[in-house]
Image (spheres, grey):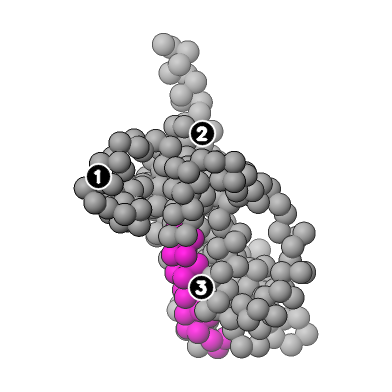
Amino acid sequence: MQREKITNRILTVFFTVLSLAWIYPMVMILMNSFKQGTAITTASAFDPVTAATSAGFANYISALTKQGFAAAFGYTLVITLTSVALILVCCSMCAWYVVRVNNKFCKALYYLFVFSMVVPFQMLMFTLSSLADSMGLNTPYNICFIYLGFGAGLAVFMFAGFVKTIPLEIEEAATIDGCNPVQTFFHVVLPIMKPTYISVGILETMWVWNDYLLPYLVLDSTKYKTIPILIQYFRGGYGHVELGPMMACIMMTILPIVIVYLLCQRFIISGVVSGAVKG
C-alpha cells in the first residue's frame, strides 16, 4: 500500500510537469498577443506583459480587420461542421451495417477502413489535389467529402467497437414492433451510441478545425482561406512578419476548440472505453 501511494505521487508529479510543458506554449502565445511587435522579437518575449511592452487589443483588432479573419473563420466553421456531420452519420451507419451483417465482404470492408488509418497522407496528396480539381471538390462546401474519406477509418473503428457491445435483442425487439432498418438505427441504435458520437465528434472536430495541409492543397487560396492558412499571410515586405497580429490570430483560432474540448473531454474517455470493450 505504501509503495502504491509513492508510485501515485510520482505519477502525479510527472503528469503535472508534463501538462505544464504542454500549457506553456499557449501561455506564451496569449502573453505575446498583447505585446508590441518589437517586444516579441527580443528577450522580453518570455517576460509578462508590462506597460512598456503592452499593445492592448491593437493586435486583435489588426488580426480581425487586415487579413479577412471573419471570412476565414466562416469557411473554417462551414468545413468543420459539414465534415464532422458527414463523418458521424455515414460512418456510424456503415459501422452498424458492417457489424450486424458480418459477412466476408463486411469484414474485408472493415479491415480496409482500419488499414486506411496507417496510410500516410503524403502518399496521396498530389493525386488527391488533381482529383479534387477534376471533381469540383475544391471549395469549402464540397471538401467535406474528402474529409469523410480520411476520417472514416478512425470513426468506423470506434463506432464498430461500440456497436459490438449493443445487445442484438434490443434491435430485434424494435423489428418486432414494426421498425424497418432505418428506423431501428435512428430511433434505437443511435441514441445508445451517444458517448461514441460525442467522442468521435470531438476528435474529428479538433482535426478538421486545425488542419492546414489538406485545405492548402485542395482549396484555391486566392478565393478561400481557412484560419490555419490565413496565419501565414501575416507577412510584410522583405520577409517581415507581423508577430503581434499573428499571435492574436492563433489565440482566436485555438480558443474555440480548447473550450469545446474542455467542456466535452469526459466523453472522450467514456466513448473510447465503451468502444474498446469488444474488439
Nearest-to-viewer mark from 1 and 3: 1
Element at label 1: helix
Task: Describe the element under mark 3 as helix, strand or loop.
Answer: helix
* Prevailing SS of the magenta stretch: helix
Residue at left offset 42%, top offset 42%: 163
Residue 81, image quadrant: bottom left
Estimate the spatial distance between the alpha carbons at disc 2 and disc 3, rounded to whole Å: 32 Å
Q: Which residue is mark 2?
A: 279
**Left or right: where does residue 14 sit relative to residue 171?**
right
For residue 229, above or below residue 265: below
Q: Residue 33: where, in percent of width, then height?
A: 52, 71
Give the Cα separation between the discs numbered 1 and 2: 28 Å
Residue at image coords 71%, 69%: 128
Q: Earlier in the sequence, mark 1 or mark 2?
A: 1
The stretch of residues the image draws in magenta is 66-88
Please say whether residue 243 is one of the residues in the magenta stretch: no
Is 73 inside the magenta-drawn segment? yes
Q: Which disc number belongs to residue 176?
A: 1
Q: Amino acid at mark 3?
A: Ile
- In percent of width and height, residue 20 lies at 52, 46
Q: Amino acid at mark 1?
A: Ile
Residue type indicated by callout 2: Gly
- Percent position of residue 162, x then y: 42, 41
Q: Which residue is mark 3?
A: 79
Determine whether 246 is above or below 8 in the image.
Answer: below
Disc number lying in front (1 or 2): 1
Instruction: Tell me how far mark 1 sits from mark 3, CA to CA.
Output: 40 Å
Q: Position of residue 34 (x, y in %)?
A: 50, 72
Would residue 222 appear left or right of 264 to someone viewing this image?
right
Q: Nearer the viewer, residue 41 or 70?
A: 70
N-terminal label among 1 and 3 = 3
Q: Decide: few, some or many residues near mark 2? Use Cα within 10 Å; few <14, some 14-19, many ≥20.
A: few
